[in-house]
Amino acid sequence: MDGVWAAVVTGSFGLIMLLVEKGRRENTRDHNFVAEKLDSLKEDIADIDADICVVESKIDGHINDHLNNFQKVKKK
């Protein structure tokens, strides 16, 4: 009977180790997937930041045009 319990305990630990190893592999796979998504997101944010700088400079120029026109009209 002791041999049966030893086999059950050994088999149980073997099954637990199998599940732990499967979880570890899934975690590594998921980690790599998330890392790729974050790299992609970082590139998108950099593109948006560059676009914002262009829009900001255009708006600044537009506001300056209005200010210059206002000052010209005010001097007349």
Image: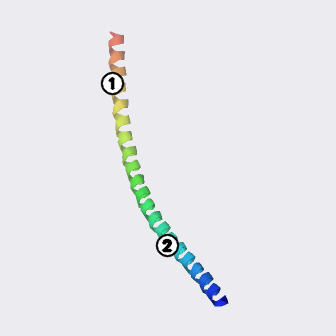
Which residue has dot 1 on it?
A: 65
In which quadrant of the rendered view does residue 15 lie?
Answer: bottom right
Q: Residue at x 35, y 16 (%)?
A: 70
Looking at the rendered structure, the kind of residue marked 2 is Lys
Q: Nearer the viewer, residue 37 or 69?
A: 37
The quarter of the rendered structure image containing the C terminus is top left
For marks 1 and 2 on the same chain, the one whose residue lies earlier in the sequence: 2
The Cα–Cα distance between marks 1 and 2, rounded to whole angstroms, is 65 Å
In the rendered picture of this protein, how many numbered marks are placed on residues?
A: 2
The vertical placement of 69 against 25, above or below, is above
In which quadrant of the rendered view does residue 48 lie?
Answer: top left
Q: Nearer the viewer, residue 46 or 38?
A: 38
Looking at the rendered structure, the kind of residue marked 1 is Asp
Q: Residue at x 39, y 56 (%)?
A: 40
Which residue has dot 2 on it?
A: 22
In which quadrant of the rendered view does residue 17 lie?
Answer: bottom right
Q: Residue at x 58, y 79 (%)?
A: 12
Task: Decide: few, some or many residues near mark 2? Use Cα within 10 Å; few <14, some 14-19, many ≥20.
Answer: few
Judged from this view, the residue extending furthest toward the right is: 2
Q: Nearer the viewer, residue 40 or 9?
A: 9
Q: Nearer the viewer, residue 9 or 20?
A: 9
- Image position, residue 11 (x, y; %): 57, 82
- Image position, residue 23 (x, y; %): 51, 69
Q: Residue at x 35, y 31 (%)?
A: 59
Judged from this view, the residue extending furthest toward the front is: 1
